Image: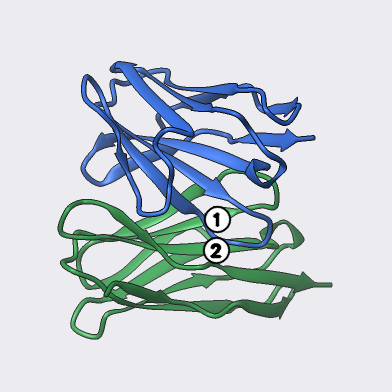
Chain colours: A blue, B green
Amino acid sequence: GAVVSQHPSWVICKSGTSVKIECRSLDFQATTMFWYRQFPKQSLMLMATSNEGSKATYEQGVEKDKFLINHASLTLSTLTVTSAHPEDSSFYICSARMTENEQYFGPGTRLTVT
Amino acid sequence: GQNIDQPTEMTATEGAIVQINCTYQTSGFNGLFWYQQHAGEAPTFLSYNVLDGLEEKGRFSSFLSRSKGYSYLLLKELQMKDSASYLCAVLDSNYQLIWGAGTKLIIKP
């Protein structure tokens, strides 16, 4: 199957700093990528839909100025958590859409804000 | 609104069979997915159903009834490594994935 990578796999940062997470589709081009957040023992929550060459579409309740998404190429989307706070600590997962009904997930990034 | 329901938790015995149900009400339907997610890891794809009926893939099978808004995932010959959460997700009319909350499956020896 298709491969999606995320970097870093885990990161610890201090409160108030910014963290960038990369999502790459390694063997296919993805015009659409998705960013999810998952808190412990909870299901995936879609944060935003990232479209190559255009602005991301954010879900209700997700602050676009805090979670900056850039989809600069057909194989790369980045999520930057700005001015991170402890409540932003979570498991962030990206997925890349290859076709309308094929979506592949990255391995996830565990963010801990101290 | 859009809604997907699945049991929160199920327990089964190693070597047995378990069926995890999923019911959905969504705006449009372009297929239903089952994913497996181990703790601390991203979901991995198990199955995709878009037509009614049973799809068998090794020890795992998935069934869909579009008229009833119902699907189930059947796991046979359970192994300890099958302990995980199983997520049901529906692709709606906008090709957006709508996720269920997941079913935590606990396998006991």
Residue closer to the observer: B43 or A13: A13
Task: Identify the secondary structure beneath mark 1.
Answer: strand
Query: Which residue is identified by label 2?
Result: B86
Measure how far apart labels 2 and 1 are at the Cα level: 5 Å
- Seen in the image, is A38 located left or right of residue B51? right
* A46 shown above or below A30: below
**Label 1 near label 2: C-beta < 8 Å?**
yes
Q: Residue at horizontal 68%, vertical 56%? A: A40
Q: Amino acid at mark 2?
A: Tyr
Q: Position of residue A108 (x, y in %)?
A: 59, 36
Q: Position of residue A5 (x, y in %)?
A: 52, 24
Q: Residues within 10 Å of mark 1 (few under 14, many from 20)?
A: many
Q: Residue at horizontal 24%, vertical 71%? A: B26
Quadrant into which the C terminus of chain B falls: bottom right
Q: Residue furthest top?
A: A73
Q: Residues within 10 Å of mark 2 (few under 14, many from 20)?
A: many
* B77 shown above or below A95: below
Task: Identify the secondary structure beneath mark 2.
Answer: strand
Query: Which residue is identified by label 1?
Result: B36
Of all chains, the one bearing label 2 is: B
Residue closer to the observer: B92 or A103: B92
Q: Amino acid at mark 1?
A: Gln
Q: Answer yes or no: is residue B14 visible.
A: no
Q: Residue at horizontal 66%, vertical 52%? A: B38
